Image: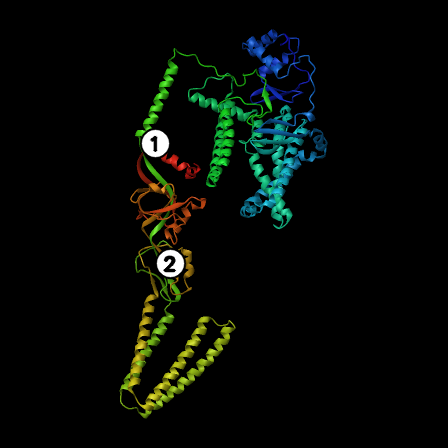
Amino acid sequence: MIAAAPRLRRDLTVSRLETANGGFLIVKHPVSGRFYRFREAERFIAEQLDGETPLDVIRERTEERFGAALGADTLKAFVQNLDKIGLLDTGKPTAKRNPGRGPQIRGSLLYLRFAFFDPDRLLGRLVPRLRFFFTRPFLVLSAVPILLAFAITFANAREIAGDLPRLYQASAILPFLALILVVASIHEFAHGLTCKHFGGEVHELGFMVMYFQPAFYCNVSDAWLFPEKSKRLWVGFAGPYLELVLWAFATIGWRLTEPDTWINYTALIVMTLSGVRSFVDFNPFVKLDGYYLLSDYLEIPNLRRRSFKYVGDGIKRLLGFGRKLALQVSRRERRIYLIYGLVATVSSLSLLSYGLVRVGSYLIDNHQPMALLLLVSYTGLRSGRRFRRLFGQRSARSDPDDDGDVLTAQPEGAADAPETPEPKKKGRRPRRREITWGAVAAAGLALLFFVHMQLRIAGPFTVLPEENADVRAGVDGIIEEIRVQEGDQVKACEVIARLSDKDVRAELLKTEAQVREARANLRRKLQAGTSAESIAVARAAVSRAQDAAKFAQAKLSRSKQLFEGQALSPQEFEAAQEQAVTAENDLAEARSQLRVFVRGTRPEEIEAARAAIDRLEAQQHLLETQMGLLDVVSPATGVVATPARELKEMQGQFVGKGALIAKVYAVKTVTAQIVITEKEIGDVRVGQQVVLKSRAYPDMVFQGAVTTIATAAEGLSSGSADAAAAKTASTSSTGVRTFVITTEIDNRSGLLKPGMTGLAKVVGGDRRVIDLLTRRLGHTFKVEFWSWW
């Protein structure tokens, strides 16, 4: 029963806040420790509750102050609500709150809080000793290692990624857990110390499980009593900032120490742990420090819950089910609720869906139906709460989507007032709505069953030339001249490069002389008899050949010593060997000639002379052929594809027979190799139209038709050159089997170049919309489900 002149409790802690949304009165209950927020009108009414002023007088004063009517029932309901939450003085003795003896476990299964102890006294003793951490010099000095750590991270990103596998070991579990405890404790103590430094009280430090996810917490709700917004922001910012400082020192320590030391290993764990935690903490769409910082900055408590409710109400109104709310929201708050609510809703549901798909796919592949059921149940719990909050349903105090810090002091149902239906107009509006929805349903059915759309099967593609011709050297030699540049158009048999002809030409001239000499000797042998002068000449030739052989052997001996001492090149040593062999051959020939002259000409000698001529002529023909091969020509018409830098570096280099000098691509018509996933390949047929868009020309469309379809999946066919060429565009690295199909594209414009990539769509023909939907649905669920029953 409410007294005629009610009075507020005398032991309430009260603070006035001026925000962008107007003035507020924050009241802290001395027993429960809960906080309540009064708007301007509510504050004026509460200040009149002095135990002497009747409710009728308070109502008149309120109407006079704000120039609006206030119903007696509304005022009475407001006062009853104050009494219900324990803010009125009922005259009955109430026990004072003992912070250290509150309930140790609170909340629900999805949001459990385990209070460890009351840290208020400990924090009170620490604050004077740690006062330096709340000064501007500390802020400036701590910014230096943070900036340095960011620079180290960007400069050593690859090294950090390569070092992370050290943490993927069973031996890292215990140190990881221990460091999580240390880092989280420092984080939460930073919140508590900052709140205590600004004059607040901190009576709860503990551990919580939110949606089965562990986390530490420090109750710094007293920050709501700080009139200055900057102090409230510092309380929320202290924890993640100090953890960012820890991350900075850990990053610097990791960079300075050797990888095989325990300091480096500890720094790596702290760097990884604090880096990930800082990234998550500053995310305003996760209910951690970033969210509370944003809520404090905007001065809107319960921002997430209110934003979800505002967006949900908007969706209901768009669908024709919503009604006007009794709660008045300013234009600024509407903008904030709309932006935050939309982004938070989309990001939360997208993250849940992504996690469900990835983890669910793994469980399906490993045939774990029970684990999949638990995963779906857990995801349903999280998403169900979000949908209920989105469409304005009230939740328990322990709902994780409720901040649990500041509550409204309005009468029950006023903060989230029930929707009031608009007056009906002779029953026409509901009937019109039914007709509208019926027409929409009929149009949807007609769209599904009578409208046809093209089936398009998409996949990445890689451009290959129609013909890939290799320009190779026909003989050993030194490249004397490169006559083309990268991108030049060449025709078949056009000279690409020329090899030096000095050695081959000299050998050819020598062979030609030997042929003439052999023919002259044959003519002499065919002449009857031998003169004394011829014998004398032959003996002189033997003498000269002996001197030449002796000189060649001496030169070869010197060359061998120089070659073994690495003072002579292999080519020069081979030349010395060749000269020695030639001299020996000349000596043997001279002696043979002398014997012929001495004995006279015999038939077998004439036959041998003719054979020698044949041998020399064959050698001459070979050298002439080699002279022709010194001009390296293109085997096909096309474009030079070898980089200009490589062509330039080849000039003056020795190349062996068959060495690659340049590549020539025939690109008047190019081949596009398209990678199609296994579940899509069943609808691809040879001859179907293909539409392609290259990343180099996103505003242009290229046309083609399917020419070939691979007979085996990517990676299953041995020796498949086509599959290897399309490997860069393949998605087989993700575990999805793929097939390669090809199409030919007219490229007389020369726009498409080998190696270009893009996206191609195979046109599979007209299909009903319902057929396209059922096809997509069938491809969504894995065939592994079939084995479960």
Q: Please determine whether, in this image, residue 745 is positioned above or below residue 394.
A: below
**Which residue is denoted by mark 2 in the rendering?**
662
Q: Quadrant of residue 188?
A: top right
From the viewer's perspective, tell me whether residue 20 is left or right of residue 633: right
| Residue 295 percent coordinates (x, y) | 56, 27
> Which part of the image, by quadrant, shows the C terminus?
top left
**Which residue is denoted by mark 1 in the rendering?**
770
| Residue 257 percent coordinates (x, y) | 63, 49
- Residue at the extreme left: 527
Residue 698 at least partly seen: no
Q: Quadrant of residue 226?
A: top right
Give me the residue at 38% from left, 88% from top.
Answer: 540
**What is the spatial separation of the Cα atoms under label 2 and label 1, in whole angstroms?**
54 Å
Disc 2 crowd rating (10 Å Cα; few below 14, some 14-19, many 20+) is many
Q: Please determine whether, in this image, residue 120 is positioned above or below residue 508.
A: above
| Residue 28 percent coordinates (x, y) | 64, 21
Residue 133 at least partly seen: yes
494 vs 351, nearest the viewer: 351
